[in-house]
Amino acid sequence: MIKLAPSAGVVIAGTAHVSQWSVHEIALTAARDYGNPYTEVVVTAQFSGPNGATTTVRAFWDGDRDFKVRFCPTAKGQWTYSIGSTPADGGLTKSGSFIVDPPKPSDHGFLRRDAGYPTAFVFDDGTRYFMLGTTYYAIAGNARASERWRESVTNLARYGINKVRLFLDAPDVTGKGQPIPIFHPPSSPFADRADERLDIDHWRAADRIVQLMGDQSLLADLIVFPYRRDEAAVGTLAQDERYLRYVLSRYAAFPNVIWCLVNEWNYSILPHAYWDAMGRLASREDPWARAGDNPRALTIHQQTRPDWNFPNATWPSHTDIQFGVRNLGTATKVGDEWQQPADGVGVFEHGDQWGNYSIVRNWTGEHPVVNDEFGYIGEPIDQSAGKQRGGNHPRLTREKHRNALWGIVVGGGYAAAGDKNDYADGRPYMSSNWHDVPEYGDLKRVADFFTAPGLEYWKMTPHNEVITSGVRVYALAEPGRQYVIYAAAGGAFTVDLPAGDYTAHRFDPRTGDELSLRDIPGETSYEFSCPDPQDWVFRLSIVDRGSRTAAA
């Protein structure tokens, strides 16, 4: 997707050529030294392109006297640029031009909410994107300590996972204040946070991660601000804004980058209004934030709770829910947090129940809905399940993890997983070291099912009401045209269909095997039976009589 190079491209007759949707990097060297270039110098570049297109981009400091401008051209043709700085510095002044050629086949532009189908994502060139992610919070530390993270990225792509959630500033403690034995000292954006002195090696490690993910067609879901339960994000409001602008200047030009302001914002000492203001700033100052009515992917993550916390904000592109194994009993809202019972059986015992509810509960038809922590693979404590003998909750099973995933996607939503199994080299969701487990196959089968030719999932919405009998059965539909039905507990169920004949297929989510069933008539209640009490998926499509007649 992205090729990052220190040069501007191939030089022909003195004019650089780059391809559309690629990252064009311009290097600058300051004429003098600064005490702290991060806080003392602002470098701005103005780009002008075809049809009057203009884009303003900030440069970022990259160590010593080095500054860089990263730019992604959105249109083919001639572009010019002019760069200047405050305070004025001859080394940070530059102008030039380049030619933008057609994009490479692997480059599709930025990911956006689709204005035409607003519960779906789409790239700038119209390519569809079915979001299925995972979590590698501390991958930047791995990128400084070893090369093992590369294996993880390439294996994710092999399994159809196309998004990675990662901290730009990974925590060194768990929520209970216990050290996470991964990388010590942990990699941080700041060598000295108090004095705002950047650790450039950290940022260069993050560059390598974003670049490799782009090469593998993976999105880097950058969690911008550090996760801190009892401190401010970075420092003062001015420091937070400067940090956010630096992140934008360094990574906004990458089409495979999407934004998440902070993880579990409710637990910070900063209020809802503060994060709302940060979201508006990110949307306003990202040079590629909008393309017509299609906003770039930008959101904020929250604690385990059933309601989306920013329903009236205009800057999020999509709803980002965390609702999984910790969906405990009746919750009481206190300030910005939900105070839940410390123990007890969850409201939703089964994964498909909480997965589907997390999407349907927040479905407006105006935004994609993503459950970014529906349950980690190998979750050691499944609080939605009753306690075992001895007083401990069981681990999250593979079956329940798969149930939750299918509950989400048949609710019309998207999901991110993560591996929380214990290994000698750390839990992968933090360490980003690869360990192959069967759940990855379950994830791939979901990806393959929804991206197969013929299924237009972006036109479908949750319609559980068409299921008139059955236990734990859910429906995603474009009524009268296409249906995906998930029977989480097997058995028999009845579905109401409007007029027409339908083809039917039964899909095994454990193996990927698919069986064609006989055509079924519409405008009736039709009963299906699963072959056993395991989970099964059914796909129904209206018969195109014209095509069948022509074929005959």
Image: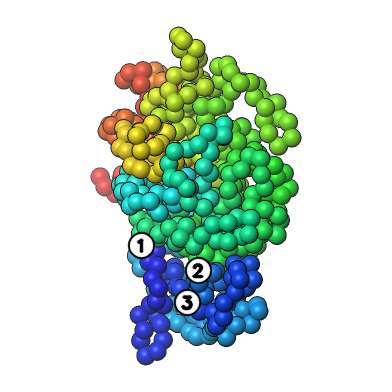
Q: Amino acid at mark 3?
A: Ala
Q: Amino acid at mark 2?
A: Asp
- Residue neighbourhood size for the residue with mark 2, other residues' Cα within 10 Å, grouped as few (<14), some (14–19), many (≥20): many
Is tag 2's residue or tag 1's residue first in the polypeptide sequence? Answer: 2
**Is 191 above or below relative to 515?**
below
**Is 137 above or below relative to 404?**
below
Calculate the distance from the C-alpha at mark 3 to the C-alpha at mark 2.
10 Å
As drawn, the label of residue 27 is 3
Task: Give coordinates of residue 513: x percent, y percent.
Answer: 27, 33
The residue closer to the viewer here, 32 or 97, is 32
Instruction: Describe the element under mark 3 as helix, strand or loop.
Output: strand
Q: Is residue 314 visible?
A: no
Name the residue located 55 percent from the left edge and 56 percent from the top edge.
190
Name the residue located 45 percent from the left edge and 82 percent from the top edge.
98
**Is 445 above or below relative to 46?**
above
Residue labelled with disc 2: 62
The residue closer to the viewer here, 447 or 198, is 198
Calculate the distance from the C-alpha at mark 2 to the C-alpha at mark 1.
28 Å
Instruction: Describe the element under mark 2 as helix, strand or loop.
Output: loop
Is tag 3's residue or tag 1's residue first in the polypeptide sequence? Answer: 3
Task: Give coordinates of residue 40: x percent, y percent.
Answer: 64, 71
Tell me whether the residue at label 3 lies in contact with that at label 1, contact meaning CB atoms closer than 8 angstroms: no
As drawn, the label of residue 106 is 1
Identity of the residue furthest to the left in this view: 552
Task: Give coordinates of residue 269: x percent, y percent.
Answer: 69, 42
Is tag 3's residue or tag 2's residue first in the polypeptide sequence? Answer: 3
